[in-house]
Amino acid sequence: MKALSDEAKQRLWRDNHAMLMPANPSKDEKSRLGFYIDWLGETRRSWYQPDLQAYRDYLLFERTRRDKKGARKSATLSPQTALAHLATIRGRYAALTRSNEMRDLLFELVNPDDSEAEQRAMVDEFFIRMMNDVHPAAAPVKLVAKQDTADSEHLRLKPYQVNALIQAPGIANLRGLRDTALMTLMVCTGIRAAEAAALQVDDLRQHLGGELSLRVREGKGAKQRLIPYGPLNWCLMYVDAWLGRAEIKAGFVFRGIRRGGKTVRPTGIGAWTVNDIMNAYAISIDGALRAVKPHDLRRTYARNAYDYGMDLERIRQNLGHTSLQTTQTYIGELDGRDRHPPNMFSPPHDPHSLQLLLGEALA
């Protein structure tokens, strides 16, 4: 980089977001590259001098985020998740090395007094150094293979524990009603935190083969799917009560609540907010208070559906997993009636009280 002037270096440093964020990023790209770009800014680094070893250590040991009160708390990533973040970043750098616009920009910034051969050599050296810096060998992540996973690492709630979790927020105020509706819908459909956060009002009542279903517009792998409610459609009573009380008729289903707890924000919540919400409602499991994670509700849905007689292929389709692809080609798309879950949970609140609550919210 000796041939670049200080002014040129400053220009490159200011272009972290412009250079690293693609025009139409996927959800994973937007999230992972966004975290990386923020880190570059906070540590006063430039995109053209990546230090993935330092960023790897940040993800694994140092990463924090602010909670609702503005306090910093640990938000380190597992080795598997950190590896996925680094892979996305490396993929973006690889795309930059194939970009003619990138090469043109660099030729504009090299010393114009240098010969064409010197300029070309400088640009080539730039790319070589950058790709060496982001090579997997420069920032390895050690993964420990597990033959078995302890029960304590994942939660699969039993029906009575589901009831305890749903009752924890209460339904007397706006925040409690939202949190109850959110967790109820997630456990009754098995959707991911990000999928719940992205739900729109018109996603709540779609149909698959005549069966009332929830639409996930864009799940993992950019796949849209429908999840029949079956006898668990009582979860919509909570969601409808929340929408009525919050005066939401269109747009995002789940939204932030303004200070004071009386009104809601116009924008939807994020996946991290879903995690924060659930962390607030620890329940007793095996004699100890445990916070239930969003993904624990997916495991709970899958395990209870299986225990109640639902076959693995129908569970796979409802959860949006990509495995059992060969089986899928033989079976084809299953009818909604065959895929709706059994009546494995029941509403912990009195249905009559819920109907009254819904009537008050819609009045």
Image (cartoon, helix red, strand yellow):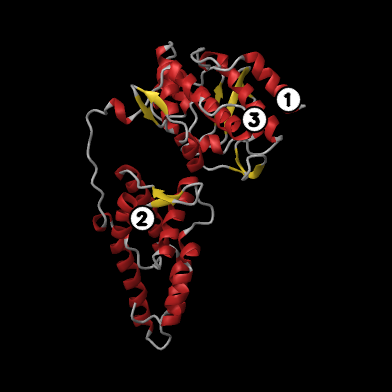
How far, Cα to Cα, is label 1 from label 3?
11 Å
Snapshot quadrant of residue 131: bottom left
Measured from the top left, where is residue 291 in percent x and y? 41, 32
Judge whether residue 184 can be spotted in this image. yes
Q: Disc 1 or disc 3, which is closer to the eye?
A: 1
Q: Which residue is mark 2?
A: 90
- For the residue labelled by badge 2, is the local secondary structure a helix, a strand or a loop? helix
Looking at the image, residue 32 lies above or below residue 5: above
Q: Please, is residue 47 above or below residue 174 in the view? A: below
Badge 1 marks a residue whose secondary structure is: helix
Choose between 166 and 284: the one closer to the eye. 284
At label 3, the amino acid type is Trp
Quadrant in which the N terminus appears: bottom left
User: In what element is the residue under mark 3?
Assistant: helix
- The residue depicted at 45 percent of the width and 72 percent of the height is 12
Residue 203 horizontal/vertical position (percent): 62, 31
Q: Callout 1: few (<14), some (14-19), or many (20+) C-alpha neighbours within 10 Å?
A: few
* 317 relative to 171 in the view: left or right: left
Nearest to viewer (mark 1 / mark 2): 1
Picture coordinates of residue 290, whole percent (x, y): 38, 30
**Of callouts 1 and 3, the N-terminal one:** 3
Mark 3 lies on residue:
242
Q: Residue at x 52, y 13 (%)?
A: 338
Decide: is 53 above or below 124: above
Identify the residue under disc 1: 360
The first of marks 1 and 2 along the sequence is 2
Mark 2 and mark 3: Cα distance apart in space: 42 Å
Q: On the picture, is 61 further left or further right than 72?
A: left
CA separation, marks 1 and 2?
Answer: 53 Å
Residue 124 place in picture, x, y as percent = 34, 72
Task: Give the residue type that dot 2 points to.
Answer: Arg
